[in-house]
Image (spheres, rainbow, N blue to C red):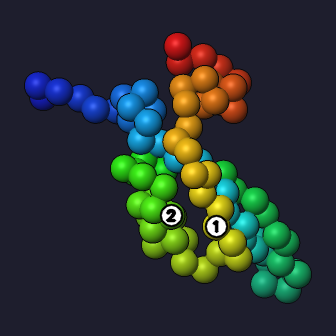
């Protein structure tokens, strides 16, 4: 049994979660035209720059990456997820 467990909620409460918006192409079948889709994901990082680096490393082929400069607050996360962590 570990002495300490650090989970997503802990990172969120300490200002270490950043919202990243990605735009990429999605193609249902090879003979169909690609569609553009937007993806929102949460990245655990020490700062904006690290969040941007992680996102660009994980998804190098996307059309665009936009990282919110301020970390997500627990209230913002709860609102976006339509539930409460508080």
Instruction: List x then y, in percent, for residue 30.
Output: 78, 84
* Most distant residue in the bottom direction: 31
Q: Which residue is mark 1?
A: 65
Residue at (48, 50) in percent of width and height:
43
59, 45: nearer the viewer? 45
The mark total stands at: 2
Residue ID at (85%, 72%): 35
From the viewer's perspective, tell me whether residue 15 is left or right of residue 62.
Answer: left
Q: Is residue 71 left or right of residue 3?
A: right
Callout 1 secondary element: strand
- Can you say which quadrant of the picture contains the N terminus? top left
At 78% across and 63% down in the image, what residue appears?
Answer: 37
Percent across and percent down for residue 42 are 54, 47
| Contact? badges 2 and 1 (CB < 8 Å) | yes
Can residue 41 be seen in this snapshot? no
The numbered disc on residue 52 is 2
Q: CA distance from mark 2 to mark 1?
A: 8 Å
The quadrant in which residue 10 appears is top left
Q: Residue at x 60, y 31 (%)?
A: 77
> In front: 31, or 69?
69
Secondary structure beneath disc 2? helix
Q: Does 49 sit left or right of 73 as displayed?
A: left
Q: Which residue in the rendered view is the most extreme toward the top?
A: 86
At label 1, counting other C-alpha atoms closer than 10 Å, the crowd grade (few under 14, some 14-19, many 20 or more) is some
């Amino acid at each position: 049994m570990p002495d300490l467990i650090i989970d997503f909620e802990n990172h969120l409460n300490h200002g270490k979660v950043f919202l990243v918006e990605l735009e990429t192409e999605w193609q249902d079948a090879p003979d169909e035209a690609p569609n553009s889709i937007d993806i929102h994901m949460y990245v655990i990082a020490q700062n904006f720059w690290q969040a941007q680096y992680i996102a660009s490393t994980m998804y190098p082929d996307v059309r665009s990456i936009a990282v919110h400069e301020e970390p997500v607050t627990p209230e913002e996360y709860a609102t976006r997820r339509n539930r409460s962590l508080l």
